[in-house]
Amino acid sequence: VRIPTIADLSRHHAATRPDRVALIFEDQRLTYGALDRRANQVANGLLAAGLRPDARIAQLSKNSPTYFELLFGGTKSRTVLVPVNFRLAPPEIAFVINDAKDEILFVGSDFYATIEGIRDQLATVKQVIALDGGHATWPDYAAWRDAQPATDPNLPVEPGDVAVQMYTSGTTGHPKGAQLTHNNFMALLPRAIKEWGLWHDDDVVLVCMPLFHIAGGGWGLVGLFCGVPNLLTREVDPAEILAAIPKHRISKALFVPAVILFLLQHPACAGTDFSSLDLIAYGA
């Protein structure tokens, strides 16, 4: 089956395997059908807010399923997700948000205080939405999302449209926005599956790298493209990862080399059952 855009990826699995688990996160299990419905609600919320095609939305938070809700919802509304590196200093966060001209900022509770401190510097941001709720003045994300209709807006999305704008680490100056199109992803995903071993319908994929980086956000799309369950961790925690591999029978994972070293150095590593794991992708 040819899937031309990321928006169609969400639709395809919702139509063909709606009850299959897409994301496992802490005590949540989100099916492909539910993920697609949430993406529709996000898309309708963005359209109701008056965002035009090619407008940018930003997310500043640690890993959670909301990244994929915003990614699929953004593509369905023809807006572009800008995941912001949460390890940056506040002036660098402000630079990225202003450089991208983000209009709505979705922020996790770990970073409420950070954004409060730089809010007056964010020239293009019209609205801040609190992903975890509980903020005195910003709308609660779940309430904002769930107030929207769950019907698919079905806007025409071109394969050449930008889907995600990820920023480089900025080692030689300011971070630079790398614009990734639907074509970029839809060339990458089938090739990744072909090049990286055999993929099976009973695979379970570990997504533990930060989603603002291609090693997290891109790898997460590989498992979703395959229509298999993906275990998402909030951050890189060696003890949590080592416990999760046998518990969830993880079969595919991506780690950067430093994380492999952290896992090998952890006391629990020697006693961990890795028998389910048949692929580790690594790089950087």
Image (cartoon, helix red, strand yellow):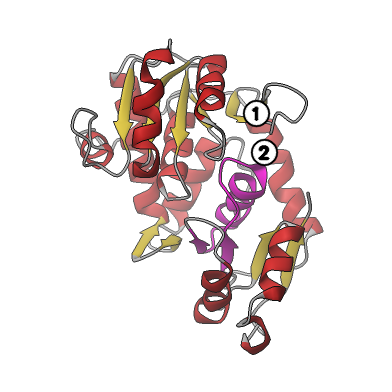
**Residue 153 in view here:** no
Q: Is residue 125 magenta?
A: no
Q: Residue furthest bottom?
A: 271
Give the residue pinned by disc 1. Answer: 181
Give the percent coordinates (x, y) of residue 75. 49, 30
Give the percent coordinates (x, y) of residue 159. 63, 27
Q: Do the CB atoms of the residues marked 2 and 1 lie less than 8 Å apart?
A: yes
Q: Quadrant of residue 255?
A: bottom right
Is 236 in front, or is 253? Answer: 236
Q: Residue at x 34, y 26 (%)?
A: 116
Query: Callout 2, which amino acid?
Result: Phe
Q: Residue furthest top?
A: 123
Q: Residue at x 46, y 43 (%)?
A: 67
Q: Is residue 75 above or below residue 192?
A: above
Q: Residue at x 28, y 37 (%)?
A: 141
Q: Is residue 283 above or below residue 53?
A: below
Q: Is residue 153 left or right of residue 180?
A: left
Q: Is residue 235 left or right of residue 281?
A: left
Give the residue pinned by disc 2. Answer: 185
Circle 1 residues within 10 Å: few <14, some 14–19, many ≥20:
many
Is 93 in front, or is 273? Answer: 93
Query: Callout 1, which amino acid?
Result: Thr
Q: In the image, which residues are magenta?
A: 204-233
Is 31 in front, or is 60? Answer: 60
Q: Is residue 205 magenta?
A: yes
